[in-house]
Amino acid sequence: MTEINIAELIGTPNAIIQKFGLQVFDETVALIDSGNQVLLNFSDLKNTTTGFFHACIGNLYKKYGEDFFQLVNVSGLHKKEDWKEKYDEAINLVRNPDKASEIDYAIAKLFE
């Protein structure tokens, strides 16, 4: 199993933009496609956002489906209360695209 220290990969302890999530996604895909299982280590992070989790975890789950759980392990999500919730939400929105559409619609209505 190959570990990715997310803070080291993105160069900051603040995983707060989608670009950082896509970096994690790209690195993880490269490792998985080379035959590795991956451990995503969140423990050196100080801040995360929902967008970050959607970009990395949501996209990984979308790409690998239920195999995601055999290919990707995580550590350090316990550091902040809401990180596990954001992680789970990223997966659940891929599993339930209608719910994602409802959220997108509700957000769009805020800006009308």
Image (cartoon, rainbow, N blue to C red):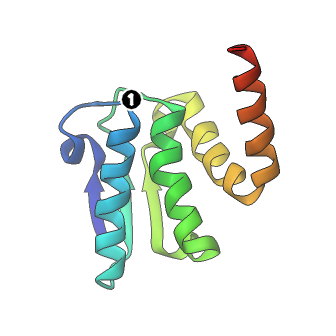
Q: Residues within 10 Å of mark 1 (few under 14, many from 20)?
A: some
Residue at the spot 64% in from the left edge and 54% down from the top edge: 91
Picture coordinates of residue 78 (x, y %)?
A: 51, 38
Picture coordinates of residue 72 (x, y %)?
A: 46, 67
Residue at the spot 42% in from the left edge and 44% down from the top edge: 76
Total numbered labels placed on residues in the image: 1
The quadrant where residue 32 appears: bottom left
Choose between 43 and 91: the one closer to the eye: 91
Residue at the spot 43% in from the left edge and 51% down from the top edge: 75
Residue at the spot 54% in from the left edge and 34% down from the top edge: 50
Choose between 109 and 79: the one closer to the eye: 109
From the image, tell me which residue sits under label 1.
16
Instruction: From this view, report whether residue 96 is shown above or below residue 16.
Output: below
The quadrant where residue 29 appears: bottom left
Choose between 66 and 78: the one closer to the eye: 66
Res 1 seen here: no
Q: Secondary structure at mark 1?
A: loop
